[in-house]
Amino acid sequence: MEQKALLIELEPVVEANLNRHLSLAKEWFPHEYVPWSDGRTFDGLLGGEPWRADDSALPEVARTALIVNLLTEDNLPSYHHEIATLFGRDGAWGTWVHRWTAEEGRHGIAIRDYLTVSRAVDPIELERARMTHMQSGYENAHDDVLPSIAYVAFQELATRISHRNTGTATGDPVANQLLARVAADENLHMVFYRDLLDAAFELAPDQAMRAVTDVVAKFEMPGATIEGFGRKALSIALAGIYDLRQHHDDVLAPVLRQWNVWDRDDLGAEGDKAREDLAALMSTMDTQATRFEEKREARRLRLAR
């Protein structure tokens, strides 16, 4: 099915899921999640106190995860451009694009205010990292509608898990509460995209299956262009905040079950081949995740000694 035809056929589903989303989404305010009374003026124009590494008791890995999460949110203008270009700005599609953008923007506001007020990060280094990352922009790796929907279904769930586990890793009740609130939004976004692709499977099962397989094969988080992302992602994985096992077991597997990919009987030859490829990808990833867990445990025992 052609992309334009898919957009038209899926618009009633978008509208129905948008209405459901609006009925479930809770209004919340970033300023209520920030301990403003803990803040102090920084050095610079107002002559306050310079940032020090011991200003915050947050564990270093939690600090790293918070920075990655925030810088990922910062690229929102690029994300908006990509999905508005793909989905359009009219009708239910356009309404969803703008609503999603508004909700995601709130996440960046809240996390940045928390980090600045709590002095959890060096504000100068954070701003420099933001400038570098945003200037790199973001380009959708999937030009077509179905793989783009599949990607965000997985990515929103991955982001939810990352935010939730980061909150736990901070050991700070305020940060934990804030990131739980952000994660709740991400979960609703995931449900929207997941159910949208579920409907697409009914319209074009072979195309949908190939789209899912291609996305799983090439998946990377939108923050992958952050400077030093590989090193940061490894430390986050070693801490168990987000690793390959979670990606396989808690992101890919449940969404694939929701789409009934393993038991579908409406696939043609192309869809069957895509499903075979997907099964091989999942098996390889499962093996890789087990190896990483074994190496991580060996590292933990070595450090303990």
Image (spheres, helix red, strand yellow):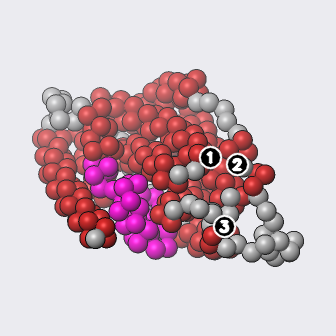
SS at badge 1? helix
The quadrant holding residue 44 is bottom right
Question: Magenta region: which residues?
Answer: 219-248
| Distance from the alpha carbon under mark 3 to that under mark 2 | 16 Å
114 falls in the magenta region: no
SS at badge 2? loop
Report the residue at 68% width, 63% height from top: 119
Q: Residue furthest right?
A: 46
The quadrant holding residue 173 is top right
Residue 73 or 295: which is nearer the viewer?
295
User: How busy is the neighbourhood of tag 2: few (under 14 within 10 Å), some, or many (20 plus)?
Assistant: many
> Where residue 297 sits in the image (x, y, percent)?
25, 61
> Where residue 25 sits in the image (x, y, percent)?
58, 30
Q: Amino acid at mark 1?
A: Val
The reply to whether dot 1 and dot 2 touch (C-beta < 8 Å) is yes
Report the residue at 41% width, 54% height from top: 241
Query: Which is more N-terminal, label 2 or label 1?
Result: 2
Circle 1 residue: 174
| Distance from the alpha carbon under mark 1 to that under mark 2 | 7 Å
Circle 2 residue: 34
